[in-house]
Amino acid sequence: MDSNIRIEKLTLNNFRNHKFLKLDISKNMVLIYGENGSGKTSVLESISLFDTSHGFKASNLSEIINNDLQGPLEMFGVNLLLNDSNNLKKIGIGLKKTMDKFQKIISIEGKKTRGDLIKNTPNIYSVIPKMTFLFQSNSEERRNFLDKMIFVIDSNHKKNILDYEKHKIERIKILKKWKIQNGEWLDAVEKKMVSYGLIISDNRRNFLKKLNFMLANIDKEFPLLQIKLKGDLDKLLLEKPAIEVEEIFASTLKKNREKDLLTGRTNYGANKTDFNVLEKESHKDVKLFSTGQQKTILFLLIFAFIKCLEQAPYNKTIFLLDDVFSYLDNKFVNMVLEKLNELKVQTWMTDVKGDWIFENNKYKEIIDRINIDDKRFKVN
């Protein structure tokens, strides 16, 4: 199924180092190139703000405002003209300040809407340089990496996670305020956590089955990989019937109330999922491989995910690839871009020079090449 959404125009006002930037896009592949410090990553970051509250850099909102902005906050803005299945739609992001706190405002066709209105904004899948340390980082980073792939295929997964997190936070607040005395209230909140948590865990398990199938059928010159879930809840779902896991989940939350009160966090549940990636023949964890090998393996996972999109219903998806070509050989880059182009997924990329694009004739017809240093696009 085609993504059927693309950005036709991007306008930035006082975003990061861009006082003003306007880009008109006619193709599904967009390469932003230019010198270091010219604001290539900032362009992609601005798009990522439509998918997450603080963008792929997870920055404080005060940090994304141009340092030279001297007028009112209304002079800040990120605006897109989206072509959504041949229907043009304007969406924008502004900021407001209440006391010392900045808040994001999303508008659709000039009308303000809730920031979490998933169905009206594009689904953004980002690949950024810090992901190259995925196998050495913490479980939350790996969990987010997994969930963001599932978001592309199943928008309900994002809603389920938001609902799970809401009840998880509520439970900790109850524990802090009432200790373990308010049993009925805690029972009700924990019941919701169990319900959402099992759906989330089951989605992760089913998605990894598809991903492992794709990994098993990638070009033989690459290592044969297998992903395994290793959270306690995930292991239980492999060993026992769902109804029994539901009871264990609920009873563990109840048993852990004092522990969770003392630590201030939830020590059991869907929020503790993790996974590791093994080289199948040697059973060696890829975190023990060289840095260069880990970078290639990361992109093998992403390529397998892109292959999953051939067989899954997905929509409203845009890919952002920030500075990923500096550590991948051209053959691998071609594999990824050719597959995304086949799927008609609009893909925004950054690179310092973009030499590999200029040298390949087949990309001239399908890629918009934008030199971010070109003064025609911006005002300093």
Image (cartoon, rainbow, N blue to C red):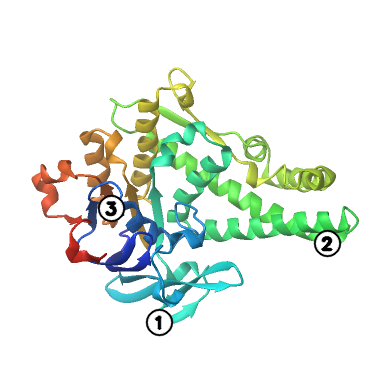
Q: Which one is closest to the eye, mark 1 or mark 3?
A: 3
Residue 107 sits in which quadrant?
bottom left
Task: Identify the residue at image location x=54%, y=35%.
Answer: 275
Q: Is residue 167 above or below residue 239?
A: below
From the viewer's perspective, is 196 left or right of 358?
right
The amino acid type found where label 1 is placed reads Gly
Name the residue nearer the viewer: 249 or 143: 143
Residue at 34 percent across and 46 percent down: it is 306
Residue position for label 3:
38
Instruction: Point out residue 172 in the picture as x, y percentages from the top left corner.
Output: 76, 54
Structural distance between the alpha carbons of marks 1 and 2: 41 Å
Q: Nearer the viewer, mark 1 or mark 2?
A: 1
| Label 1 crowd bin: few (<14), some (14–19), many (20+), radius 10 Å | few
Q: Quadrant of the C terminus?
A: bottom left
Sequence-wise, the earlier of marks 1 and 3 is 3
Res 241 quadrant in image = top right
Query: Which of the two discs, 1 and 2, labels the residue nearer the N terminus?
Result: 1
Tell me which residue sits at (43%, 55%) in the image. Answer: 152
Dot 2, crowdedness within 10 Å: few (<14), some or many (≥20)?
A: few
Q: Is residue 315 above or below residue 207?
A: below
Disc sitting over residue 136 in the figure: none
Label 3 or label 2, whichever comes before in sequence order: 3
Nearest the camera: 216 or 23?
Answer: 23
Question: Can you identify the residue that label 1 sits on?
Answer: 110
Residue 184 horizontal/vertical position (percent): 86, 60
Callout 3: few (<14), some (14-19), or many (20+) C-alpha neighbours within 10 Å?
some
